[in-house]
């Protein structure tokens, strides 16, 4: 097992940013459906999805938000942090084959219990970098936006 670099609360500065990018595939989302138990037909049944406002299947919103977990847990603040909460709003759909980027920006540092508990407030955004369904409409648009609360272990 490799060694992880754990940053401390004091190491992290307001304004720091990080990005995690992924091209979302249909098998990714199918696995997510199996793990989560969410088999809503808008995600798994093309014929059903054609009759919706989306006109095709879309990626689970919770899968999209899981990309935020990746940038937080692996990049900023990274290994050793605890994902304490998330306020999130889904603003545009993600489609199979889209390349999206989860962005994190530290906007606040604060403590509780006389400094024993250390938290970061992180602005989180998932951006559609390359949409295969309707690039003109969705490229560069946010798929999700909000704020995460992170408990720092060190």
Image: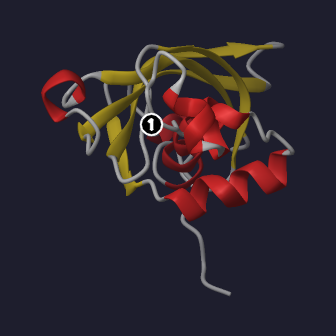
State the residue position of label 1. Answer: 12
| Near-viewer residue (13 or 59) | 59
Is residue 118 shown above or below 64? Answer: above
Q: Give SS at disc 1.
A: loop
| Residue 32, x across and y down, in percent | 71, 52
Q: Quadrant of the C terminus?
A: top right
Please indicate whether residue 19 sits to the left or right of residue 47 in the image.
left
| Near-viewer residue (139 or 127) | 139
* Residue at 70% over, 60% down: 31
Is residue 66 something one can see in this rendering? no
Q: How is the image coloured?
A: secondary structure
Circle 1 Cα neighbour tier, 10 Å, few/some/many (<14 / 14–19 / ≥20):
some
Q: Quadrant of the N terminus?
A: bottom right
In which quadrant of the rendered view does residue 105 lie? top left
Please indicate whether residue 122 sits to the left or right of residue 22 in the image.
right
* Residue at 80% over, 25% down: 116
Is residue 88 something one can see in this rendering? yes
Please identify the residue farthest to the left as the structure is shown.
136
């Amino acid at each position: 097992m490799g060694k992880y670099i754990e940053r401390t609360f004091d190491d992290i500065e307001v304004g720091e940013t990080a990005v995690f990018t992924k091209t979302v595939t249909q098998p990714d989302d199918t696995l997510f459906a199996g793990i989560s138990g969410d088999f809503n037909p808008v995600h798994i049944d093309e014929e059903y999805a054609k009759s919706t406002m989306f006109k095709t299947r879309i990626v689970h919103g919770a899968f999209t938000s899981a990309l935020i977990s990746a940038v937080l847990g692996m990049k900023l603040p990274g290994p050793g942090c605890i994902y304490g909460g998330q306020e999130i709003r889904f603003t545009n759909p993600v489609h199979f084959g889209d390349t999206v980027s989860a962005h994190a920006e530290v906007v606040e540092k604060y403590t509780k219990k006389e400094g024993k508990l250390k938290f970061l407030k992180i602005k989180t955004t998932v951006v559609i970098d390359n949409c295969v369904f309707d690039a003109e409409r969705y490229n560069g648009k946010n798929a999700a936006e909000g704020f995460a609360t992170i408990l720092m272990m060190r």
